Structure formats: structure tokens, C-alpha cells
Amino acid sequence: MNRFLQLHLLTSYPPANLNRDDLGRPKSAVMGGTVRLRISSQSLKRAWRTSSVFETALKGHVGTRTKEMGKRIYAQLLDGQIRPKDALEWAVKMAAQFGKSKKVDKEKALNELEIEQLAHFSPEEEQAIDALVATLIARKSGPDDAELKLLREKHSAADIALFGRMLADTPLFNTEAAAQVAHAIAVHRCQVEDDFFTAVDDLNTGREDRGSGHMGETEFGAALFYLYICIDRALLLENLQNDRALMEQTLSALMECAATVAPTGKQNSFASRAYASYILAEKGDRQPRSLSVAFLRPVTGEDTLPAAIEALERCCRNMDQVYGSCAAERQRMNAHDGSGTLVDLKAFVAAE
């Protein structure tokens, strides 16, 4: 097996605000002495694992990330005609297996049903929870210690296998992420711009007031982004309980998501959906490396995409020349000149 799979993507987004900072502006970073737009890895991973592409390709192998599983358990117990006091007590005990309960507000006892940190539940754990709820409803009594062992070391959740899971209170059930996702970074100088907008009141005839019904301002930016992903295929296979067919499905789904799924921020305002224009996929056993250094010097000129492709490929060739080849095999797709296909790339990343 070629242990490491590395993906390098160039994707151009038109005016957008895909990933906002605490002020509502597009996220940015300084690289090579210039300001670049940025899309965080957290934003990208969430968009991928919650996408219809991922759900369709990996049906039955996608987990749920939430603090509120206790609330769902409580509602199920109430539906099963369990007294509210008992339902609350049992649901709190079950939820506590996945994390510490929030501090109790005496006025709002239901706060206990939430845990402090987001927990990622595998499909097997959700099935175990549902089965235990059904048992408690049937016998009208609470869970014992043995029944509360709901966490699973072995599971088939592809999203947990790829992106990992950290449970601070029960580290035995942590999963080390098999995929490392860099923040996508613009390959050229960028500027965040302001869009002033107004909205007209449809029932305002203008006889008394010709002004707008609402005024506002939103920030946006446009950029060609470089994205780097590295997957430890051996660790992914281990995380998926050595199910090779599921690993191949997972890699194929990740490849399609990275190429075609955009973050959801402000999509209704900007419709800034985009497919990758260029993808380089590499497989090998050598220590991985990003090719972001190709863009320390920002790409300039009007024909940005071909210039960025050339900079990326030149950087790859030069790295190979001084270090030796980083990859045993490579596959490319270039939508700019019409070479390669996503179908071929998906087959390449999934193959042994």
C-alpha cells in the first residue's frame, strides 16, 4: 500500500463570504507579506461531511456531532410514557457517558441533558442508545452500569475515521484523524470589500416616504484558493476496522467532496458555488509535504489560473529534483485545458 495520499487543489470562488470571522468579514491571513483570503479547515470539513455527496456515498457510515444527544434521549423516553422525572434522570446518565453535563441551573434542570463539549457519535453508538432506550421503556426501570457502556472503540463511521474524535473524559475512545486538511489560502493578493445594499418595502407607495425599508452592509472577497489535504491511508484502514471496501468508498467520497462541495456561508447572498479547476493527486510512502511554498510570492497578472497551475507544477518538479520524488504515482485533472476527469481521480485515490 502507498501509505500517504496527498491532494492539491486550485478552486476559484467569485465574490463570496464562505467563512466569516468574529466581525462577519471573510477570514484572511498574511502569507508572503501580503493579505490573502482564507477558508478554515473546520469550515471545509463540516461542509464535506454534511454534504449530500458524503451522505449518499457513505450511507450508514456517517456519525452525528452534537452536545444535545441527551435531549433526544429524553424526548424518546417521554414518547414511551416514562415519567418526566425518571426520563430526565435516565437521559442524563446516558448522555454523561459521552461527556460532562453542563452546570445545572436549578430553574432549568433540562440543562443537564447537554454535555459541555461536542461529541461525535458513531452509527453503532446511536444504535446502542436507541436499543437501550427501547429496553428502558419496555421494563419501566433505569439503566445499570453495564448497560451504560455505550461508547465503542470499533465503529464504521467514515467521518470519525477521517477527521478524528476527541473525548476529553474518556480518551480510550478517541480516534486519531487519518486526514489532515490545511486552511485553503488565496494564491494572490486579496482585498475584502464592502457591499452596501438596500431593501424596498413592497407596500410602500412612495407617497410619503421614498426611502428604502432596510439598509445594510456585508463584506465579501473573491479569490483563487490553494487547498492541501494529506491522508494516512494505513491509519484510515485501521480506523475503519480493516474494511478495505469501506476505505475505498471513503476516499472516493472525500475526493468528490473536496472537488465539488463548497462551504455554505452566505451562499444565498452570493451563490458562490465552485468546482476545483485543477487537482494533483499523489500516492507514496515518502514523508508528505505541502506545495504552498509555490505561492509565497503572490501570483500576478490577469490570467491567474494558468499562472497558478504552472507555479504549482514547477514547485512540485523542483522539490522532486532536490529531495527525490515524493510520490510513487500521480494523477492530474485540469479543467482549464480539459485534461483528466474526476472519475479517473476517484478511481486513482481509492485504488491500492
Image: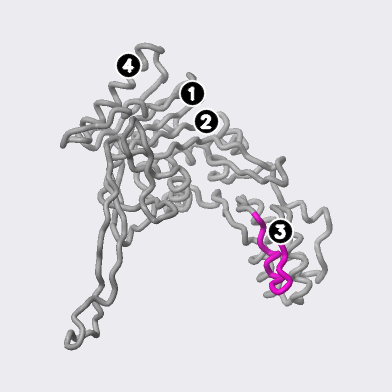
Is residue 211 one of those drawn in magenta? no
Q: Secondary structure at mark 2?
A: helix
Q: Secondary structure at mark 4?
A: helix
Sequence-earlier tag: 2 or 1: 1
Name the side, left or right, on which 4 lies relative to 347: right
Q: Is residue 210 above or below residue 174?
A: below
Residue 244 picture quarter: top right
Residue type, numbered disc 4: Asn
Q: Is residue 341 above or below residue 90?
A: above
Residue type, numbered disc 1: Asn
Give the class, few, some or many, for how many residues have Cα within 10 Å of label 3's Cα (few <14, many ≥20). Answer: many
Question: Can see residue 352?
Answer: no
Q: Secondary structure at mark 1?
A: loop
Q: Are marks 4 and 2 in contact (CB under 8 Å)?
A: no
Residue type, numbered disc 2: Arg
Give the class, few, some or many, for how many residues have Cα within 10 Å of label 2's Cα (few <14, many ≥20). Answer: many
Query: From mark 4 to mark 2, how far is it between C-alphas?
Result: 26 Å
Q: Nearer the viewer, mark 3 or mark 2?
A: 3
Any mark on residue 233, and which?
2
The residue beneath circle 1 is: 2
Residue type, numbered disc 3: Ser
The residue beneath circle 4 is: 318
Residue at (17%, 88%) from the top-left corner? 207
Sequence-earlier tag: 4 or 2: 2
**x then y, percent, for residue 248:** 48, 37
Question: Can see residue 42?
Answer: yes
Sequence-earlier tag: 1 or 3: 1
Question: For the magenta stretch, what is the residue range?
Answer: 103-116
Q: Is residue 328 above or below residue 143?
A: above
